[in-house]
Image (cartoon, rainbow, N blue to C red):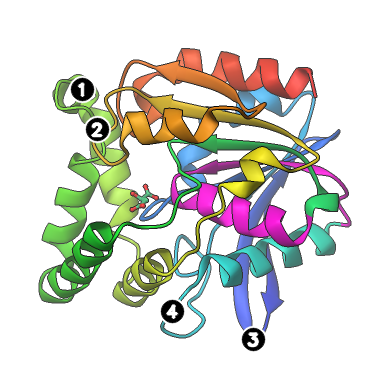
Amino acid sequence: MSYFITYKNTAIHFKDIGKGNAIVLLHGFLENHRMWEDLIPLLQDKYRIVSIDLLGHGKTECMGYIHTMELMAETVMAVIKHLKLRRVTLVGHSMGGYVSLALADVHPDYVKGLVLMNSTARADTPEKQLNRSRAIALVKQNHTAFIRMSITNLFRPKNRSLFRNKVNTTKKEALKTPLQGIVAALEGMKIRPDREVLLHFSPYKKMMVLGKKDPILDYSSLIAQTQNTEVEVVELPDGHMSHIEDFKLFSSNLIHFIENL
Ligand code: MLT
């Protein structure tokens, strides 16, 4: 079922289905709750699945001109409190992972498990920050071209034709993201702090799912983050879109993690 709550005068949209321990699914940049549509049927018989549209994405409105990861985490927390959930498992794809970390940083007592999927605990490098500023200029010039190019670049090159239909659906959904939402998320990601310490010192179980050929994230940096931690690492062979490019491996590893919490 689809619901809205109002938080700080802003409509926040989410879906809530199933009963049991709560799994909170957080999409990435230019995505929305629909990215989880293939995964949810595998979980909804045993768990309560809450998939939330982050600020300026999907059916959730914008709140100003910078959506920090902390502000997005606040809206997620508002949904968690509204539903009276305790100790949830957060599954965040990329930017959704940054938001999960921001939430877990402030509310570790609400977290039972944390899954970072094609995401990183590190802050942007100066080079990445520069690229974000370029992206902001680009999207202001040509919204459609920016989105089409950005989505294509998330997939491993050889998968772009193999998963043509999924790539096109992802683009179609992404094209619904308003300019303000895109710019605000880019500004927010640009200034997010490093949260690697949470991978070392936190009371909940953690898993990192990474694509060895992720065009966006550096594989060796991700592996380095997990050294000397108890983070479970799942290495998948493809790109940034593990829920599409490696759906079976991704979903079976996720279910295994959740079942063993
Ligand atoms: C995402 O998929 O959410 C973004 O690529 C993350 C990022 O740009 O850091």
* Circles 1 and 3 in contact, beta carbons < 8 Å: no
- How crowded is the residue under tag 1: few (<14 C-alpha within 10 Å), some, or many (20+)? some
SS assignment at label 4: loop
Q: Amino acid at mark 1?
A: Asn
SS assignment at label 1: helix
Does residue 52 show up? no
Q: CA distance from mark 1 to mark 2?
A: 6 Å
Q: Earlier in the sequence, mark 1 or mark 3?
A: 3
Q: Which residue is mark 4?
A: 66
Q: CA distance from mark 1 to mark 3?
A: 41 Å
The span picked out in magenta is 84-107
Q: Nearer the viewer, mark 1 or mark 4?
A: 4
Q: CA distance from mark 1 to mark 4?
A: 33 Å
Please state if 114 lies on the left or on the right of 223 as rendered. Answer: right
Q: Which residue is mark 3?
A: 9
Q: Which mark is residue 159?
A: 1
- Above or below for 111 versus 162: below
Q: Residue at x 24, y 24 (%)?
A: 163
